[in-house]
Image (tube, rainbow, N blue to C red):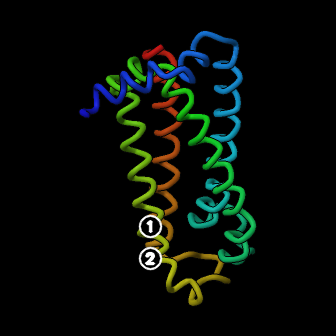
Amino acid sequence: MDVPNIIQWLYDTSLATGIRESFWFPGIETFHVLAITNVVGSIMILDLRLLNIASRNRPVRELMSEVLPWTWISFVLAVSSGFLLFISRAINYYPSWPFRVKMLLLVFAGVNMIFFHLITFRDVHLWDHEMKTPVAARIAGGVSLTLWIAIIACGRIVGWTAS
């Protein structure tokens, strides 16, 4: 089965039709926006620490241990609600360039996070309590912040152009 057929199949499911033809879409969309707000807000707390802009007196590991559980819970909720929104308008969203850019940016954000955790973070014991983070950590924070702002912008464009 090729991608266009899968997209059509998703769009034709009773769940997608139910969302599309009922009052559920605005509620799911609101839930999605709130979940994304939590994702980006919690990531921003850490990114601003990595950029030496905020929370400089807090150890990075301590801040991460407080923030990342909320990030992951919110991310799962955002992906779940986003999937429901997607299937309800899959034939409109899939060919949309802002949707595709948003998905690509999400992949880049994931790669940035993986790179940070596997490379930069493994030396955190050397700079955890320092007010100034190393250049690699600042780059990871800046890239992350930029990507998440772009993801939000693309998401808004999707809402206005692919409905």
Q: Which is more toward the observer, 6 or 119? A: 6
Task: Please give the name of the residue rendered at 65% of the width and 33% of the height, measured from the top-left corner.
Answer: 33
Asked if 128 appears above or below 4 in the picture, the reply is below
What residue sits 66% from the left and 55% below the top?
71
Disc 1: CA contacts within 10 A as few (<14), some (14-19) or many (>=20): few
* 150 vs 67, nearest the viewer: 67
Who is closer to the viewer here, 89 or 97?
Answer: 89
Q: Which residue is mark 2?
A: 118
State the image coordinates of residue 103 (x, y, percent, origin top left). 40, 40
Mark linked to residue 114: 1
Residue at the far left in the pictured view:
2
Give SS at disc 2: helix
Q: Is residue 65 above or below residue 98?
A: below
Separation of marks 1 and 2 at Cα, in angstroms: 6 Å
Locate the N terminus and report the quarter of the image it occupies: top left
Circle 2 residues within 10 Å: few <14, some 14–19, many ≥20? few
Instruction: Return the x and y of residue 127 as percentages of the image width and height.
Output: 58, 84
At a point 52% along the width and 51% down the height, the residue shown is: 145
CB of mark 1 within 8 Å of CB of mark 2? yes
Q: Disc 1 marks which amino acid? A: Ile
